[in-house]
Image (tube, rainbow, N blue to C red):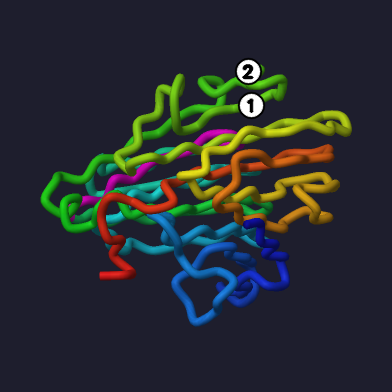
Amino acid sequence: MIQMVKKSEQYNANIFNGNFVVNKPVANVNKTSVQPYSNLFYWSHGYTLQNIEFGLHPHEGFEIMTFILEGNISHYDTATKVWTPLYTGDFQIIQSNSGIQHQERIEKGSRAFQIWFDPNFYQAIQKKPTYSDYRSQDFLPKLEHGLNTITYIGEGSIAKSITPGLSIKKLLLETKTKTSITLKENSSYTFYILSGEGKIGHLLVEKDDAIRINDSSVLEIDFQGELFCIQTPAKPDYKPIWLA
C-alpha cells in the first residue's frame, strides 16, 4: 500500500508570532492522515523567519532526533550542561529515558527535522538519559544499490539508536533517475521529499510531500532530487505508548 500525504494534508502550524513555520507528516493529533504508526510518534519539519528560542522543557521515554537541514541551532541540556552548536548536515540524538530537560536557540533562516521515536517507553524510563551530537563530515554519501545514499541510522553508521528496527537514510538523485528500490515487506517506510520532483510509485510528488508505504517489496521511482527515508518495523514487538 502506498499513501500520499501532501504538505497541505499534514499538520501545519505557525508559532512564535508566525516566525516558526512547521509542517508535520506525523503527529499525535486528531487528523487521520498524520497519525503515529509503528514506533514513529512525531515528525516535524520547521523553519525560522527570525531568531527564536525554545525555553528549558522536559522530555522522557522518547528517543528524539534533530536533523539540521539548513542553518544553525544551539542546544543546551541538563545532561551535558553546556551550549552546543549544530550546523547544516549535523544531527543529534536525545535518549530522554528517565527524564531530561533541554532548550534550543534557532537562527533565522534555519530549517530542521525533529523526529520522536518510542524505543519501548516503559523500558526506556528505567534508564539514564543520554545525549549525542553527530557531524556532517561523518556521514558522506556512498553508493547503495546504485544510488548515492547517506545512512544516518542503520548498518554502517557510527550513530547508535535504541529504537528497534530503525533505519534512516537520505537518497541523493542528482539527475532524473528511473529505478526500483527493494523494500522489506515486514517494514513500514515514509519518504519525505526534501527537494525535487518526479514519481514515487504511481504518484506525482513535489517538495514537502510525504509518502507512506506498507506491505511492499519493491518501489518504482522516476525522480530527481533528495529523499529522506525512515524505515521502521511494520509491527514492533511491544505496544507503542500511543496505543497503550
Q: Are marks 2 and 1 in contact (CB under 8 Å)?
A: yes
Looking at the image, residue 81 lies above or below residue 170 = below
Q: Which quadrant of the figure has residue 16?
A: bottom right
* The residue positioned farthest toward the bottom in the image shown: 30
Looking at the image, residue 52 lies above or below residue 140 = below
The residue at 61%/56% (across/down) is 212
Q: Position of residue 123 (x, y in %)?
A: 16, 51
Q: Amino acid at mark 1?
A: Thr
* The residue positioned farthest toward the left in the image shown: 126
Specify the quadrant that holds the C terminus: bottom left
The residue at 42%/61% (across/down) is 41
Q: Which quadrant of the figure has residue 58?
A: bottom left
The residue lying toward the viewer, choosing from 216 and 43, is 216
Taking 243 as reference, is 30 left or right?
right
Q: Position of residue 86 (x, y in %)?
A: 50, 38
Taking 42 as reference, is 212 left or right?
right
- Say whether disc 2 or disc 1 marks the residue closer to the N-terminus: 2
Tag 2 residue: 142
Taking 244 as reference, is 109 left or right?
right
Tag 1 residue: 149
The residue lying toward the viewer, choosing from 15 and 210, is 210
The stretch in magenta equals: 87-98
